[in-house]
Amino acid sequence: MKRKLLAILLIFILSVCTFAGCGKNNTENASGNSTGNSTGNSTGNEDVNEGSTTTETNDEQSTGSSELIPITFSRVQSSTEETDIFAKLDESYDDNRWTKLYEEQLGYDVQYLWIASSAEEGTQKFNAAVAAGTIPDVICVDKVTLKNLVEADLVVDMAPYYEEYASDLLKSIISAAGEQCIQACTFEGVQYGIPYVDCDIETAQMIWLRQDWLDELNLAAPTTTADLENIMKAFNEKVGEGAVGIALCNDLDNVSMGISGWCNAYGAYPGFWIKDSNDKLVYGSTTQEMKNALAGLADLYQKGYIDKEFYVNDGTKAAEALINDKCGVMYGWHASSLWPLQDNIDQNPEADWMPYSIVMENTGDSVSPGVSMMTGSWYAVSANCTNPEALVQMLNLYCEKVFDKEKNEYSYYANPGDGLEGVWRLSPVTLNTADKNQQTAQAIAEPLETGDPGDLYGEQLSMYTYSKAALDGDTTLWGWNRVFGKGGSQMLLIDYKSSSDVTLVHNEFYGAATETMTSRKSTLDTALDEVFFKIISGQSGIEEFDEVVASWYGAGGQEMTEEVNAWYAEQ
Amino acid sequence: MRKKSKGKLAFDVINFSILFLLSFLCLFPLLNILAMSFSDSTSVAAGKVLLFPVGFNTYAYQYVLAKSAFWLSLLRSFERLAIGVPLNMILTIMLAYPLSKEAAAFRMRTVYVWIFFFTMLFSGGLIPGYLLIQNLNMMDTIWALVLPIAVPVYNVILMLNFFRGIPHELEEAALIDGANQWKTCFKIYVPCAKPSIATLTLFSLIAHWNSWFDGLIFSNFPDSYPLASYLQTVVVRRDMSLLSLDDWKTMAMVSDRTVRCAQIFIGIIPIIIIYPFVQKYFVKGMTLGSVKG
């Protein structure tokens, strides 16, 4: 028996050794690029450690031009798309069309210090690197991290380089996103970053309704909370057993199935800092309007429109009612048709949803959805970098290749087509235009009517193709059509922006978290949420709200409010 | 067969049903994952899959097995086992043997034991660990995964106590017959301690197979992840509701829950295979001595 066991163990170890042997060979052969990465990288590391910026380490790969200036980066891998690209092209992170471009035109050698496989891991890596004092030359971070870096004197003042080197195109793209993005990375008057601009309006809430049920029951689009309640009532009667009036999950500020859209109806903006009547900023979760909104929700709960156990359901669980045709009303945002609603269509191709503008408490109130800053990351340059202008120059070149109206090189550098998309991701620095998705929706509106894509290209063409296929009956692409197509969420957002009936309410605080926020905000928010759950589910009376607000102020809310108002006064 | 008394029968019924329930509770999550990996993704999203697949298909497995990243990390994990486990065991034995001697034979014994014990309670922490590995230029190498946990102190203490349980007379007999300490250790003590060695091998095997955090921290590039780290990055659930449109364009084709389930399942197969062979020592190995009579 013992011998037998020994034999088995031996066989196992032997086979493991053989496997491991293969493994080594495979890694070296199959991904020559990756091992190339790591060796190239370790030399890069030493480089930084010694604090020297000589370039002798990189002439292995560079083609003769030994004058190249190494610029180090880090990145988060978006695994599938990039492996797809590498499967089709003979390129790698360190050696691709973008790095060649930067090498040839600007003389910079792109090197990666690390590549993380998820955003969360990227943050961990970054923190470790900060501790080790080896941050990459060019970094892309959120505003809290940026603030810490600024306080530790690890990044350079970007403004002079931006002024001197940025092209008109780059400047126009960034200024189109609004002043806030720049102000958010400005500390004591010094601009330390370049925003990776994103679309603010896309944070606005909307209502998604089961269109096929609305049609069947002959119901009109809702304009007030009472209308919405009638719709829930009608839907519940139609569904019968197991019906849920409105989908709500246990993360109250979630963009899908959260409560903020409902609160907007009452003029409440949970999580926002909004102006009160005295022009001071107050925390939206603590206002009188919030109390009314919660009372409204408690009423819905009591009437049985909200799942009895919503406070234990996470998003995936709460979505099951939507997917299984048990619920026809949800608050969501522009991408809600892709998740969770697409799952409902996959399950029941007869189903259909449409986005509607949020409702208000009373008829005639101006529709006022809350909008906060979507831009979440900023490029910055390490204080150890010898050529901080590199970032701006590379962004210039990126914009020129990707956003140039002439688009001569668009297909080579951004989306070659034929199943090869997202090549722009290979560039170590990328940029978005803030209203990209709205532009797409507008650009494809007419071609969708006529069925002729005309001279659409790149992403707009893909979105046209998806939406067109959905219109022609491909239900697996339904979600895309509801984002970009006629009556879709992007069109609704355009409406929000342009319609005179809509007043957008902005989150007035967009700076980095203040001192008290860093230490207490999440605890305080949890405390508020707990009471909100209790109020909605009827375990506590609505009067509990005043108590928790009072204790919120007592436990740090007062300091936060003062800090935020001090910040506001500076703007 | 003798008839059982009523009381005994009742006891058996209750006993078996409780045990059955308990084992079912342990098995259920596993079966659920297995069922999800074979179901179509719509049914999984609709929450219809419990113990049996709904809309049976093997798409998820085909997808996973076609992914080179998965295979790379699997090989990395095998490499880690092949180097890490023998290293663990050799160091454990060589450390436990001298430390199991009486203080009379090895005067500083207690001091050494305390030094090792100290490291069980306190460690340098994450950042110093990262700095150490980085400055030793071990990032992205297999050594970063193997060397930091080369001496599993907990195992050493178990082994040490096991050696102490082996009768002193065996050592004396060996020494009188002319064996030196090396010989006594490897020819007498190690064979006597086989059950315990098998158990500790399993411990170290599982520890190496499951540990993912070091893989994440000590690798600069995803190509050098062991399987556990790779799975961790794909399995931890993304917050679907926060994905931007660009993310969706990326996600259009990709990993939904069925694929994740398939990867988890493939990931635990090797351990499931090894377990039955070594598992019996788990109990026996800890309690039984080596010399009888």
Image (tube, rainbow, N blue to C red):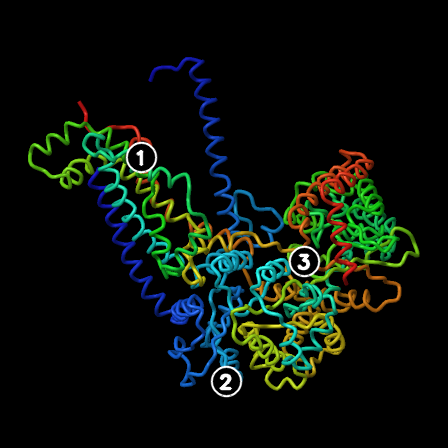
Q: Mark 2 packing: few (<14 Cα in 10 Å), some, or many (20+)?
A: few
What residue is shown with label 2? A104
Between marks 1 and 3 in the image, the one whose residue lies nearer the viewer? 3
Q: Residue at x 36, y 50 (%)?
A: B148
Image coordinates of residue B28 in percent, x first then y, are: 50, 39
Query: Label 3 amino acid?
Result: Ala
> Which residue is outermost to the right?
A364
Q: Secondary structure at mark 2?
A: helix
Q: Mark 1 packing: few (<14 Cα in 10 Å), some, or many (20+)?
A: some
Which quadrant does the N terminus of chain A fall into? top left
What residue is shown with label 3? A512
Q: Secondary structure at mark 3?
A: loop
Query: Label 1 amino acid?
Result: Leu
Query: Label 2 amino acid?
Result: Glu
Q: CA distance from mark 3 to mark 2?
A: 38 Å
Q: How many marks?
A: 3
Q: CA distance from mark 2 to mark 1?
A: 62 Å
**In this rendering, would A447 be left or right of B163?**
right
Q: Is residue A306 above or below residue A141?
A: above
What residue is shown with label 1? B158
**In this rendering, would B285 be left or right of A251?**
left
Label 1 near label 2: C-beta < 8 Å?
no
Question: Does mark 2 fall on the same chain as mark 3?
Answer: yes
Image coordinates of residue A272 in percent, x first then y, are: 76, 54
Image coordinates of residue A366 in percent, x first then y, are: 89, 59
